[in-house]
Image: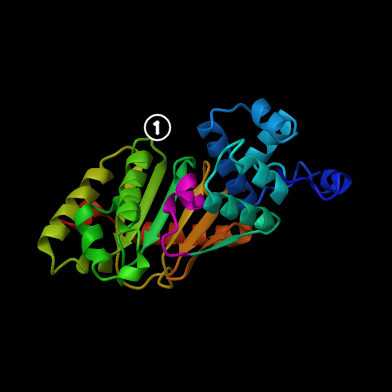
Amino acid sequence: MCGPPDSREEVLTMTNDPSARPTLARRQLGAELRKLREAAGMTHAEAGAAVELHRNTIAAIEKGKQGTKSYIVKNLCSPEVYDAPPEVMSYLTGLVVKGKQRGLYEKHEPGMKPGIRWFASAEVEYGYIMTWEHLNMPGLLQVPEYYDAQRQTRPPQEAPDEPATKNFRFKRQEVVFGRDPLPRMEFVIGEGALHVMDGLPDVKDAQIARLLEVAKLPGVDIRVLGGFHPAMSGAFTILSPTDPDDELSFVYVDALDACRYLEDPDVVSRFVGTFRTIYSMAIPIKEFLK
């Protein structure tokens, strides 16, 4: 196993202000390490003993309350401890470097396993999900027919591991909608996202049926928005542990080349304000379809 370059430096750098809000990268790192430890069937004490750390330190790292070093992550991911795949170890050591930065940027890589991203992890843990999509159907609401139709428009090189990607999309839906209780979910969909299916009646019928079905669930609201509005610049999703004003809330923005996670409270507040405006302007899906 790797060792520290300077044990005194390690103690100094890993001492954190308990009042400091953990960054997204640090929280994501902790969540992924927790999953690896649980998959290995180890307790905090056992994992700590394996890498010469106290069990409380392991717990603090997993909660994002304490930073760590790359060599510790490598030791935890080693075959003797969590036995994580090399690509997972590489990803997690990258998060160590990003751990002191506010906000997170993840470049899309061909064949990258989708389940490792913080967004998917937060969806199954956070209590409030607000999504705005102007031209696409939100991933949590898509039916297979819609996914297949959309996939046919993309170059093959963009999804070399297509079966795994598709399986992940619908497994993600199963997990989120299988939560008890369900998180509060508010979806605002642009009118154009419905019209793009006009030439595919079978796809549109299946997708509309799905929207109406989900809209009946407790705590779920789906609305449609047309005309001019303040969110015309692009889609985004806000995730919050409990409510939009929570300090751990963040905004997820996806693009062709990468995705961004925004966590500055002032920035998040602006997105929340914009979402509240378009939500109030939008029409409930059942009423829109009358």
Using the image, determine if residue 211 lies above or below residue 282.
Answer: above
Left or right: where 54 falls relative to 240: right
**Highlighted magenta segment, given as a residue range:** 108-122
Residue at the image point whose x is 15% and y is 68% from the top = 198
Quadrant containing the N terminus is: top right
Residue at the image point whose x is 41% and y is 42% from the top = 184
Residue pointed to by mark 1: 181
Spot occupied by residue 84 in the image (x, y as percentages of width and height)? 54, 43
Residue 189 in view: yes
Please tell me in which quadrant of the rendered image residue 147 appears.
Answer: bottom left
| 59 part of magenta stretch | no
Three-letter residue code for mark 1: Pro
The crowd level at tag 1 (other Cα within 10 Å; few <14, some 14-19, many 20+) is few
- For the image, the number of numbered tags is 1
Using the image, determine if residue 134 lies above or below residue 121.
Answer: below
Using the image, determine if residue 36 lies above or below residue 286.
Answer: above
Q: For this rendering, which residue is in front, 74 or 64?
A: 74
Spot occupied by residue 95 in the image (x, y as percentages of width and height)? 62, 54
Left or right: where 160 falls relative to 37: left
Spot occupied by residue 88 in the image (x, y as percentages of width and height)? 54, 50
